Amino acid sequence: MVQHAVVDVMVEMEKIELKIKGMHCVSCENRIKDAILNLNGVKDAKVDYTSEKATIEFDNEKTDIKNIVKTIKNVGYQPEEMKESKGFFKKLFG
């Protein structure tokens, strides 16, 4: 008789909100969202050009905020820190 063990692994998910400059339309939203969702470890991304915000949920063991910010910049947009996280980008990027 073969017994199977079920292992429940807790994944540490993190959620961040970024302000993104340079979006003008739904195509901009989709371009950013598609790029972020292609990153390994990103579970969900909501991008809204009218509010210039993106909310991203990701596994912090597979990707990090630096990688997400770099991806957004690589598709031609400028992520900025939210007021609530004043100084956070400075700590990350100097």
Image (cartoon, helix red, strand yellow):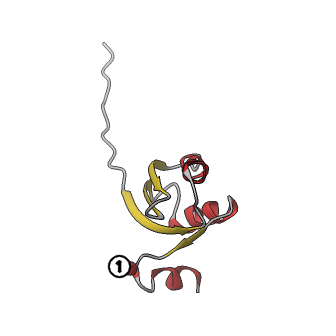
Q: Is residue 29 left or right of residue 7?
A: right
Q: Residue 83: x, y in percent? A: 39, 80
Tell me the SS state at disc 1. Answer: helix
Taking the spot 51% from the left edge, 63% from the top edge, the residue there is 64
Task: Name the one closer to the observer, 47 or 1.
Answer: 47
Splitting the image into 4 quarters, where does residue 76 fall?
A: bottom right
Q: For this view, does 85 lie left or right of residue 78?
A: left
| Vertical position of residue 49 compared to residue 39: above or below | below
Q: Residue at x 58, y 81 (%)?
A: 93
Residue 7 spot, x, y in % from top left: 32, 37
Q: Residue at x 41, y 84 (%)?
A: 86
Q: Badge 1: how crowded within 10 Å, few (<14), some, or many (20+)?
A: few
Pointer 1: what residue? 84
Whole-percent x and y of residue 68?
56, 61
Q: Quadrant of the N terminus?
A: top left
* Tally of numbered tags: 1
Q: Left or right of 1: which side holds 17?
A: right
Give 78 or 44, whichever is nearer the viewer. 78
* Residue type, mark 1 in image: Glu
